[in-house]
Image (cartoon, helix red, strand yellow):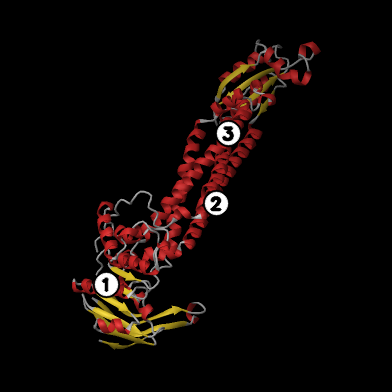
Amino acid sequence: MVRRRAAPRRAGLDELGLKRAFAQRLLPFLVAAMAFLAALAIAGMLAAASLARHWQEGAGASLTVEVPNPEAPATSDGLPRAAAVLATLKKTPGVIAARRLGETEIDALLRPWLGTTPAALGIAVPGVIALRLAPGMALGAADSAQLARLAAGIVIEDHGPWLARLSTLARSLEACAALALGVVGALAALVVAVATRAGLSARREALEIIHGLGASDGYIAARFAARTTLLAGLGGVYGALLALPVLVILADLAAPFAAGAISAGSPETIGAPATLLAGFLALPQSMWLALPALPVAAAAIGWLTTQSTVRQWLRSLP
Amino acid sequence: MISFQSVGFSYPGVGSGAGASRAAVLQDISFAIPAGGFRWLLGASGAGKTSLLRLLYLAARPSQGEAIILGTRLASTSRHERALLRRQIGVVFQDFRLLGYLSAFDNVALPLRLAGRPEGQIRADVVEMLRWVGLAERLETLPAMLSGGEQQRVAIARAVINRPRLILADEPTGNLDDAQAERLMQLLAELNRLGTSIVVASHNEALVARYPAPALRLEAGRLVADG
């Protein structure tokens, strides 16, 4: 038998009466809710990934070395203890950068606890050296021993263990968000399948007639899929638009942390037009790519689910 | 050609699996209709006429035996091949089976669209067919706005619009007045003369007498006469 290509259909012709389907009218709103949740899950996933990356690449590779009596002479040479430790650290393999914090920086760090500068209280503060290590590198026991010989009593604060826990936490959050995204996708598919089944049941008589007139499974599935793809895509658009202001507010809230400057925003300014604009601009590029992808993903889920559901249902006809 | 060899048909009964009971509707049906043949399908209510028609228009599949429709052995066809085969069969149902949300025009155009006829070539044929059945002024009317006889005429137009190789009719004149019934039979006779195979199930003995042709007579699901 010769398989003929389907002819162009008359615009607006609705052989299956799908435009009248009540369940399918609800579909965009149900999918919009799913798309909204998916947008939040994606935002959570991206935020968690960003945090994990930030911790691993940034703070994760840093540590501090405190040198008591920093200006006293070192034991092995004539240099002050802090300068001797700093010089040794700069030559240690794996150390990318090492610098001694200035007095102003230390004052700023301690002011929240002391209420004033250490000098005003007559407190002797140690010299503080900030180190950045290459990824995967750490100061070994030999390095620590060498530093201790230079300046007895030094304290090396390795942020690694708790940063590793934070990183694991961030990865777990990322996995949870990905799982939530998967669940939302599965729920969307379920919603489409239920709506399609309702549509099929409501139209059983019409489907039997059209099937009897020679409509192939592919023809009927394509009619249903075209309808649900449109409705699911619309739902995706609604959901993405609904999520946008929420994401802007969240980005506005997160902007100070992302910038690393606590003073960049305050609770009083949240929601103000200027900060909302800042939040709008602060949305990461990946989120701007994800939002338009939501309607496409919703439409794809709608098409695939409907094709599969209709073809399976049509198996009940001879 | 159409050929049934020891065909049986039963609807699924109570239960499931091997223990399910099945109500036999047709048993050991064997007959052949050559291409271009005409057969009346006769029998009392419940004799199995509608079930036999359902097998012929592929709305059901035989439970037993071998059926060949328009030269195609049903047992070895794919779903897509059966869909293509259905496009070569026109059916006039007793209860019309029109799509209530489509106009008379779109109901009649449906087989042509399903067969892939370009939209530009459909209108003239559909209008001509509806004019032939006396509904040229009701092209855009929904079935609910048509009388029973008019709906039957739309159903007839839909059944013959794509010049099928086989036409099946289940009590086709039941809702027609004498003049319309006469016109329908003349149409079927003309299509048969042009080579279309036709099977008409009817209780109307007067109609059968006016158009003498071989008959398949069923009694209690068995074929008791062929000829």
Q: Which residue lies under the disc numbered 1?
A: B183
Q: Name the residue rendered at 26%, 67% in the picture.
A: B164
Q: Amino acid at mark 2?
A: Leu
Q: Nearer the viewer, mark 3 or mark 1?
A: 1
Q: Name the residue rendered at 57%, 19% in the picture.
A: A90
Within-10-Å neighbours for mark 1: few <14, some 14–19, many 20+? some
As measured in the structure, the alpha-carbon distance from the residue carrying label 3 to the one carrying label 1 is 69 Å
As measured in the structure, the alpha-carbon distance from the residue carrying label 1 to the one carrying label 2 is 57 Å
Closest to the observer, B30 or B124: B124
In this picture, residue A5 sits left or right of residue A77: left
Q: Which mark is residue A245?
A: 3
In this picture, residue A283 sits left or right of residue B4: right
Chain letter for mark 3, please: A
Q: Are marks 2 and 3 on the same chain?
A: yes
Q: Quadrant of the N terminus of chain B?
A: bottom left
Relative to A100, residue B156 above or below: below
Q: Which residue lies under the disc numbered 2?
A: A187
Q: Amino acid at mark 3?
A: Pro
Chain letter for mark 1, please: B
Q: How many marks?
A: 3
Picture coordinates of residue A135, whole percent (x, y): 54, 30
Task: Say if mark 3 contacts mark 1, CB within 8 Å.
Answer: no
Q: Amino acid at mark 1?
A: Arg
**Splitting the image into 4 quarters, where does residue B137 fall?**
bottom left
Q: Nearer the viewer, mark 1 or mark 2?
A: 1
Q: Nearer the viewer, mark 2 or mark 3?
A: 3
Callout 3 secondary element: helix
Task: Say if mark 1 contacts mark 2, CB within 8 Å.
Answer: no
Q: Name the residue rendered at 44%, 59% in the picture.
A: A310
Within-10-Å neighbours for mark 2: few <14, some 14–19, many 20+? some
Relative to A107, residue B131 above or below: below
Relative to B84, residue B46 above or below: below
